[in-house]
């Protein structure tokens, strides 16, 4: 039951004197990366379908500065942060949801010191809330019935912010078989993208980190890897393809899984 | 009387040397930048009791946790006997506590003996884990040479210590026909049956001196060893980062100041002048927080961090444990050089480049696995990120690919060099459907 709908821009809403309940912070990956755009669309559909009054910044959104900061470029990070905070504060934003754990961590934990105080949610937290409130209903015996699914912990959601259970609880709403990889939760292995590694070649070594993690995925014999981060998604997709297993193992974001299970795609 | 004089002299010399070294370590840690870690004292105390005293995080790995617990409990409880040994030594008395405690004394010493047996078993297990089983985290390249010897030396010292206790107690039991009623040495008595009273006295004295001299040796050696953690794990857990948001990096208010000056030059007068020689990020010891320096001295080189590090697992040069070891080595080298050449001496070296290379730093994914694993709340990540800041902000030392990413963010507000208008692509696609 896919249909087109209007995605409200914050500037338009403000011009009409309206305020959204929540601002959807799309992030660079969600905006520019073709694979991640599908996650963005799936989540936007869920927001629209469940009647959450949301808006996006559109062209007024810029990088949070996370990769620059982790690379060591504090100057560029703060330029970004101060610009974004000025935009967000001008619109009197109070609540933000994002599908990127890196944006989530920066907005939630690092912007307050520079004057940006918002209630920040990761999209899995909002999904859990919508499911718990009964606003988002999954179809019985949906696309994932009986499928073997494993969840890959994002470092910036898990260890960085202590969010381990929420994404798992969202997946429990599916009638699927959830399995854990040997390294999971606080021991979860990084996908290899964090700390601005996404934007450069690996340092010399004997393996790529995403290949090491893909071995965990394959060992779990899962048919679906649920990711909660667009960068983890890219890394694991590459790893699965490299092993020529793309027909057996699907890498999907939790928002995509839930959108499919709710028949919104 | 002679023994008494020798004992007091040894005690005084050991005390002086240990005090001097402790002062140097305190001064080394004080070289670090100030950072407030004294808020929420109740929470901090709780953290110390759980992590250091209660060894909570050790229990992420059950086998080493149990073995370590044996040695740790034996070590803590044996302090009671140590107090008695020192009292006996200073005042020339024998088993000073016994008349006061009676039956309870027998219980305590027997308890210590049982714990000592457990500690002996654990020590042998530790030795075999390092030298026979050769567990991966004990055979990595940063442990080659001295660090590996350091670990083995301490374990052997442990065995000597336990040998001392049992020689002393068993000979003493034999001398008094088992009247003390100690549990384990009571069982060992047949080993010394038929020895003359003189030999038994010699064995008892030998055990006594062996034990206390090993303890003194241990004290002198501790500040140079990974075993300093038995002391510093406690303050390190107390001053740990209490937030449960490990993902938050420390802020740099001076950068905010610079940006504000840039955007609004008239505000220049409001800003406090920067401290002399203050760097952006860390190049050497004095640029790091004092807590990072305490971290380095509290590190016991167990390697749980490195074993969990994705970069290390995939063969990169980075090892979080080595980051901590290099930081401590640098502090020790500075202290040594200053002692030899005066307090203003500069050896021309820095932590960044001479001890830790950019290649190591650039392999970090900031995944926090090392921080999560550390049983005593050390953060190798803080040091890595501060050194990375120096590379970029002070030395403009950055891989080309990162420069491209920086350019993208600066010019289009995006991490890729794509036109900003493409931010709307997904919206257009959704709306056209």
Image (spheres, helix red, strand yellow):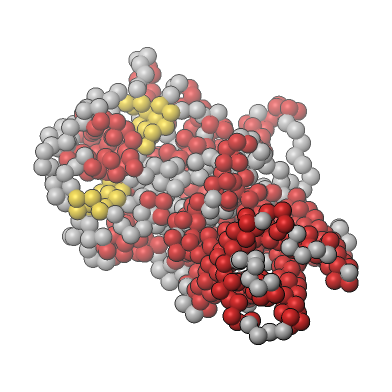
For residue B278, say whether it is visible: yes
The residue depicted at 59 percent of the width and 80 percent of the height is: B190
Relative to B348, does residue B187 appear above or below in the rendering?
Answer: below
The residue depicted at 57 percent of the width and 32 percent of the height is: A114
Percent x, y of residue A175:
16, 44
Q: Depth check: give the residue in front, A198 or A148.
A: A148
| Image quadrant assignment for residue B217 | bottom right
Residue B90 falls left or right of residue B243? right
Q: Specify the quadrant that holds the C terminus of chain B.
A: top left
The residue depicted at 25 percent of the width and 27 percent of the height is: A133
Q: Specify the quadrant that holds the N terminus of chain B.
A: bottom right
| Image quadrant assignment for residue B155 | bottom right
Percent x, y of residue A27:
39, 40
The residue depicted at 38 percent of the width and 23 percent of the height is: A11
For residue B357, say whether it is visible: no
Q: Seen from this angle, which residue lies furthest top?
A: A17
Q: Depth check: give the residue in front, A15 or A103.
A: A103
Percent x, y of residue B67:
50, 65
| Image quadrant assignment for residue B81 | bottom right
Residue A216 falls left or right of residue B371? left
Percent x, y of residue B276:
79, 45
Relative to A211, does residue B168 appear above or below in the rendering?
Answer: below
Q: Depth check: give the residue in front, B92 or B100.
A: B100
């Amino acid at each position: 039951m896919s249909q087109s709908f209007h995605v409200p821009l914050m500037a338009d809403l403000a011009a009409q004197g309206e305020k959204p309940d929540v601002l959807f912070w799309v992030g660079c990956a969600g905006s520019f990366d073709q694979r991640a755009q599908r996650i963005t669309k799936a989540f936007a559909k869920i927001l629209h379908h469940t009647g959450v009054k949301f808006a996006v910044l559109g062209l007024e959104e810029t990088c949070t500065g996370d990769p620059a900061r982790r690379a060591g470029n504090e100057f560029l990070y703060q330029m970004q942060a101060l610009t974004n905070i000025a935009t967000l504060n001008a619109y009197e934003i109070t609540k933000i949801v994002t599908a990127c754990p890196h944006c989530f961590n920066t907005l939630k934990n690092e912007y307050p010191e520079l004057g940006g105080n918002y209630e920040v949610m990761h999209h899995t937290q909002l999904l859990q809330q919508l499911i718990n409130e009964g606003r988002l209903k999954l179809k019985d015996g949906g696309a994932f019935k009986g499928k073997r699914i494993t969840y890959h912990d994002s470092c910036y959601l898990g260890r960085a912010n202590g969010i381990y259970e929420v994404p798992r609880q969202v997946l429990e709403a599916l009638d699927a078989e959830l399995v854990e990889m040997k390294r999971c939760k606080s021991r979860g292995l990084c996908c290899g993208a964090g700390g601005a590694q996404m934007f450069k070649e690996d340092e010399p070594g004997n393996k790529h980190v995403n290949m090491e993690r893909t071995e965990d995925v394959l060992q779990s014999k899962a048919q679906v890897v649920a990711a909660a981060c667009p960068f983890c998604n890219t890394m694991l997709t590459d790893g699965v393809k490299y092993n020529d297993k793309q027909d057996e193992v699907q890498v999907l974001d939790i928002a995509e899984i839930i959108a499919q299970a709710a028949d919104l795609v | 009387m002679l023994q008494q004089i020798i004992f007091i002299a040894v005690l005084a010399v050991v005390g002086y040397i240990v005090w001097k070294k402790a002062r140097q370590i305190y001064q080394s840690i004080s070289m670090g930048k100030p950072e407030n870690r004294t808020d929420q004292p109740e929470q901090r105390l709780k953290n110390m009791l759980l992590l250091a005293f209660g060894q909570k995080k050790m229990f992420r790995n059950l086998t080493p946790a149990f073995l370590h617990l044996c040695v740790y409990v034996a070590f803590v409880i044996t302090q009671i006997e140590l107090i008695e040994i020192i009292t006996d030594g200073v005042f020339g008395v024998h088993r000073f506590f016994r008349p006061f405690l009676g039956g309870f004394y027998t219980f305590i010493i027997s308890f210590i003996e049982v714990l000592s047996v457990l500690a002996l078993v654990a020590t042998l297990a530790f030795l075999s884990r390092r030298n026979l089983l050769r567990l991966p985290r004990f055979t990595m390249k940063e442990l080659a040479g001295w660090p590996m010897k350091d670990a083995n030396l301490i374990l052997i010292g442990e065995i000597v210590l336990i040998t001392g206790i049992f020689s002393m107690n068993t000979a003493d039991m034999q001398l008094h026909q088992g009247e003390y009623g100690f549990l384990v040495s009571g069982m060992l008595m047949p080993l010394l049956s038929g020895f003359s009273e003189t030999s038994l006295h010699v064995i008892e004295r030998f055990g006594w001196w062996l034990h206390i001299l090993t303890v003194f040796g241990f004290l002198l050696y501790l500040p140079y060893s990974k075993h300093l953690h038995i002391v510093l794990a406690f303050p390190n857990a107390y001053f740990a980062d209490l937030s449960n948001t490990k993902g938050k990096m420390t802020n740099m208010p001076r950068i905010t100041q610079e940006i504000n000056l840039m955007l609004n030059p008239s505000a220049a007068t409001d800003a406090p002048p920067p401290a002399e020689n203050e760097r952006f990020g860390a190049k050497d010891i004095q640029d790091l927080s004092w807590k990072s320096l305490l971290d380095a001295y509290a590190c016991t080189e167990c390697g749980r961090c490195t074993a969990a590090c994705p970069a290390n697992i995939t063969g990169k040069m980075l090892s979080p444990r080595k980051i901590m070891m290099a930081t401590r080595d640098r502090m020790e080298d500075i202290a040594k050089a200053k002692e030899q050449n005066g307090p203003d001496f500069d050896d021309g070296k820095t932590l960044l480049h001479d001890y830790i290379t950019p290649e190591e730093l650039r392999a970090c994914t900031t995944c926090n696995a090392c921080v999560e694993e550390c049983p005593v709340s050390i953060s190798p990540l803080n040091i890595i990120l501060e050194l990375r800041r120096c590379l970029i902000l002070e030395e403009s030392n950055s891989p080309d690919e990162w420069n491209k990413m920086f350019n993208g963010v600066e010019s289009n507000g995006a991490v890729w060099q794509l036109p900003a208008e493409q931010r709307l692509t997904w919206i257009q696609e959704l709306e056209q459907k």
